Image (tube, rainbow, N blue to C red):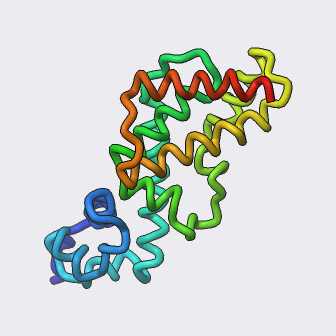
Amino acid sequence: MARKETITKDEILNAAFQMTREDGFSQVSARTLAAKAGCSTQPIFRVYKNMEELGDDLYGKAIAFFHDYYDNFPKTSDTPFVNMGLAYIRFAQEEQQLFKLLFIAENRHGKSLYDLLNGDKGSVVKEINNAKFYGCKDPSGMFMRMWIFIHGSACMSLTGDYDLQEDDTVKLLEESYKAFLNV
């Protein structure tokens, strides 16, 4: 009689995701994952061909987590790109390891930063259209200007060099948008 499975693919993936959130993906190995999941390495390699395949699923889970985070982030400003920027910066502050995995790592599993941000719901496209609606003559160019500022701020938060409060960040994003309108 065959032994009953005691750990599922979802449980393995969830353990790897938790490890990544806490310590970064570089700390996830078959042995450390098995210890976290409370199993041997055998169940891991029963459901995944190799650690790269696990990494692909983990990356997809991290993308979904970011999009849920963004979708549920309070939208408080009417100024284009401000809510997106604030959510992105806060994500970098609160989820440093996931931010590094998604937005800093060289391997983005074939996705550009634009693809990651835009997602299935067209988040960037909505912001660009919003900028156009509010009279921006070059909304795609505005996105690029704002994005350089937003991404830089988020990266600064990883090193502890970004210490602005939320109200200050909103004000800075709104002022930047208005200043870039005149470029």
Give x and y (percent) for residue 38: 14, 71
Give x and y (percent) for residue 18: 27, 58
Which residue is more in the foreground, 177 or 113?
177
Q: Is residue 76 above or below residue 172?
A: above
Quadrant location, the C terminus: top right
Q: Is residue 123 left or right of residue 67?
A: right
- What residue is shown at x 40% (from left), y 79% (from top)? 51
Which residue is more in the foreground, 157 or 84?
157
- What residue is shown at x 64% (from left), y 65% (from top)? 110
Q: Is residue 166 left or right of residue 18?
A: right
Which residue is more in the foreground, 126 or 141?
141
Q: Is residue 32 above or below residue 61?
A: below
- What residue is shown at x 40% (from left), y 77% (from top)? 48
Give x and y (percent) for residue 130: 71, 22
Quadrant location, the N terminus: bottom left
Which residue is more in the foreground, 53 or 157?
157
**Residue located farthest toward the right when viewing the structure as drawn:** 137
- What residue is shown at x 44% (from left), y 59% (from top)? 100
Q: Is residue 20 left or right of residue 32?
A: right
Q: Quadrant of residue 66?
A: top left
Q: How many marks?
A: 0
Give x and y (percent) for residue 52: 46, 78
